[in-house]
Amino acid sequence: MKNIFIGTLFLCLIGSVYAAQGGLMLGPNSLMPSGGILKNSEGVLKNIEVLSSDFSTQAIFFFSGACTPKKKDLTSDSRLCIFFPTLKLGNINQQDILKKLNKFNLIERFKFENVGSPKGVLLDIKFSEGAFVKLLHMEGKNKFIMEIYSKNELAKIDRSTGLPLYFAYNDLKKKRDAKLRVMIDPGHGGKALGTQGLYNLIEKDVNLDISKKVRFLLEKLGYEVALTRTRDEDISLVERSRKAEVFKANLFISIHANSSGGSDKAHGIETFHFNVKPFLGFLSDGAAVSYELLFIRNSEDHRLASVANNLVRSSESSSHKFADSIQNTLVDMLKKKNVAVINRGTKNACFLVLLCFLNKKIPSALVETGFITNKEEAKRLTDNNYRMLIAQGISKGVWNFASLFREV
Ligand SMILES: [Zn+2]
C-alpha cells in the first residue's frame, strides 16, 4: 500500500487533481473528455456489501466510473432518496441486500432502480421512527457508505453502561482469562499484487510470509490465530473484515509493505489505525470524505447520536493504542538488534479494511513493515531472518497491548 505522509493542503491539491483527471488530457476548448474516457464515466453500480454490528448495519456501495451521489431533499422526514448520476444498476440481488440491511427491522420500504432523464440509479428508502442514518461519501474512491443505526439498540447500550467510552476495552477485559483471538490479514493477494519492489519482491508474497510467521509466534504465546488468506488469492477488503467477525476476533492486524511512489529514498516503518476524524477530513490518498447524519429530531436523538459517536470514538481510541503498541515494540526490537530503521510513527488513515471495524469491538491496525522500493529496506526484506525479526516485533506488540488487560 502506498502511504506517504503529506500535509492536508497538499492532500486537497491531489484531491482536486484526482477529480479533474478525466479533463486533464484535453485540449483547451474541449469540455468533455475524449471517447474512451467518456465511456468510463458511464459506470455501473457493481456491488453492495452489507456489514453489521450490535447496533447498526452498514451498506458499502461500490461503483465504477465517476459518480457523486446526491441526497434528494424530501418533505417526508423518514424517507431517504439517493441519486447516483450516470450509473447503471449491475447484477445486484436487492432482496438479499434488504434482508441483511434490515437486521433491526428499521426499513419499511426499499426501492432501487435505474431511472432516465437524468440517467442514473435511484435508491428510495422509507425508514421507521427508530432509525438514524449516516451517509459517507469518499470522493474519488468510487465508494459510498450508508450506516443505519438502531436507536433502540443504542438506548440499551446507553442504559447498561452509560456513555461507553471504553467499549472495546471492556470487551477485552472480559477475555483476559480466555484465549485472545487474533486475525492476521496478509495485504493484497491474487491479482492484487500490492507494490512491486526491488529484488523482485512482490508485496502480496512478503505480506503472506510475514503473516504466517506472526501466526506461528502468536500461537506459541497461546493465542488463537487465523489468517484472512493462507495462500495467493484474491479477497475483498470487506470479506477480510467479515472473516474476522466470523472468527470472533478480538484483534485485527493487516500486514503490508510500503512503496514511495517514484522515489527510492523513503524508508522506515509505520502503523495505521482508523480515525473517526476522516469523516470530516481527508482520506490518506487525498480524496475528500463528506459525512452526514440524518433523522435526528429531538434531544433524545441527540443523546443517542452521542452514544453512537462515543462507541466509534472508543473503538478508535483502542485501535490507536493497539497501533502504538505494534509500532513502538517493532521499532524498539529492530533497534536493539542494531537495525538502522526510521520510526515513521503511528498515523491515522481511512483505509477501507480498517473502516469496516468502525462499529466493532475489535481494535484494528495496519502495519507497513518497510519500503520495498528502497534498496536497503528491500534487501533486508528478502532475508528470511529479517522477516522473522519483523514478525517477532509485531507479535510482541500484540502481547504488550494485551497485557494492558491482563493485569486488571
Ligand atoms: Zn499494501
Image: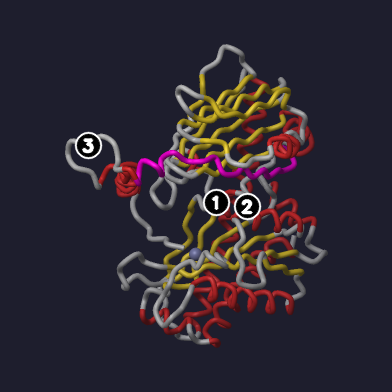
The answer to whether marks 1 and 2 mark residues whose Cβ atoms lie closer than 8 Å is yes
- Element marked by disc 3: loop
Q: Nearer the viewer, mark 3 or mark 1?
A: 3
Which tag, 1 or 2, sits closer to the chain's start?
Answer: 2
Q: Position of residue 43 (x, y in %)?
A: 47, 41
Q: Earlier in the sequence, mark 2 or mark 3?
A: 3
Q: Decide whether residue 41 is among the magenta residues.
A: yes
**What residue do we see at 71% from left, 43% from top?**
53
Q: Give whichever of discs 3 and 1 has the lower sequence position.
A: 3
**Which residue is painted at 41% across and 79% down in the image?**
377
Q: Is mark 2 within 8 Å of ligand 1?
A: no
CA gap, disc 3 and disc 1? 35 Å
The secondary element bearing badge 1 is classed as helix
Seen from this angle, which residue lies furthest top?
75
**Residue at the (49%, 35%) spot, across then down:** 87
Q: Which residue is mark 3?
A: 30
Is residue 216 left or right of 354 when viewed as pictured?
A: right
According to the picture, the residue beneath numbered tag 2 turns out to be 238
- Kindly identify which residue carries mark 1: 352
Looking at the rendering, which quadrant does residue 2 occupy?
bottom left
Q: Quadrant of residue 29?
A: top left
Residue farthest along the front direction in this orientation: 35
| Residue displayed at 46% across by 22% down | 117
Q: Is residue 95 left or right of residue 292?
A: right
Q: Give yes or no for residue 37 being in the magenta stretch.
A: yes
Segment colored magenta = 36-55
In the image, residue 347 sits, relative to residue 342, either above or below, namely: above
Q: Kindly identify the amino acid type of the residue bearing the numbered disc 3.
A: Ser
Q: Is the distance from the Cβ of mark 1 to the nearest ligand 1 atom less than 8 Å?
A: no
Q: Is residue 125 above or below residue 278?
A: above
- Label 2 element class: helix
